[in-house]
Image (cartoon, rainbow, N blue to C red):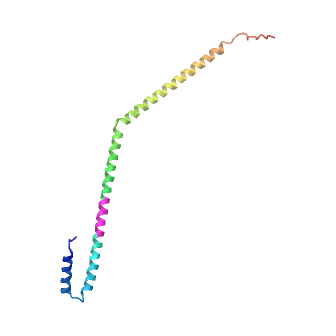
Amino acid sequence: MFDMGFIEILLIGIVALVVIGPERLPSVARTAGTYLARIRRFVNNVKSDVEQELRTDELQKMLQSQQDELQSLKEIVSSSDVTKEVSSLEKSFNETIKDVKSNNEVISEKKKKSKKVALSKKPDKPAVKQQTS
């Protein structure tokens, strides 16, 4: 706070001794010390409160900037080509599934027809196996 050297403190002590007197000086010094301690405590409390408020304000600013950045990223993602690409890929995937299903149906129908044709072309006489002895 104040830049006081040894000589300044000694001078204040001598003036206080002359003005106050030797009988009352110890009680006045004690009272002055008590008040100085209270003032220091008060200043330290105010200082720590101000620092805490500054830290809180800093954290709030950081939180707000992070929320703004997150919102801008959400907007970018929602308005970008990513959603369009995903929807086009989904359409393409659905079309491919439909094609595969229709091809499976065609193949199963061909199998059924070929089974019917094979069953309708039964041999008239069963083949006789000749036994060799």
Residue beneath the point at 37% across and 36% down: 82
* Residue in the picture at 21% in, 76% down: 6
User: Vertical placement of 18 versus 101: above or below?
Assistant: below
Name the quarter where the C terminus is drawn: top right
Residue in the picture at 40% in, 33% down: 87
Q: Foreground: 75 or 54? A: 54
Instruction: State which quadrant residue 21 falls in.
Output: bottom left
Q: Which residues are magenta?
A: 44-56
Q: Residue furthest right?
A: 133
Q: Position of residue 132 (x, y in %)?
A: 79, 10
47 inside magenta stretch? yes
Residue 67: % across, % down: 34, 50
Image quarter where the N terminus lies is: bottom left
* Image coords of residue 66 (percent x, y): 33, 50
Q: Is residue 76 magenta?
A: no
Report whether 44 appears left or right of 104: left
Which is nearer the eye, 129 or 46?
Answer: 46
The residue at 38%/33% (across/down) is 85
The answer to which quarter of the image holds residue 93 is: top left
Number of marks in picture: 0
Q: Position of residue 5 (x, y in %)?
A: 20, 74
Q: Where is 132 relative to 42, above or below? A: above
Foreground of the two, 35 or 5: 5
In the image: residue 13, left or right of residue 53 = left
- Is the magenta region chiefly helix, strand or loop? helix
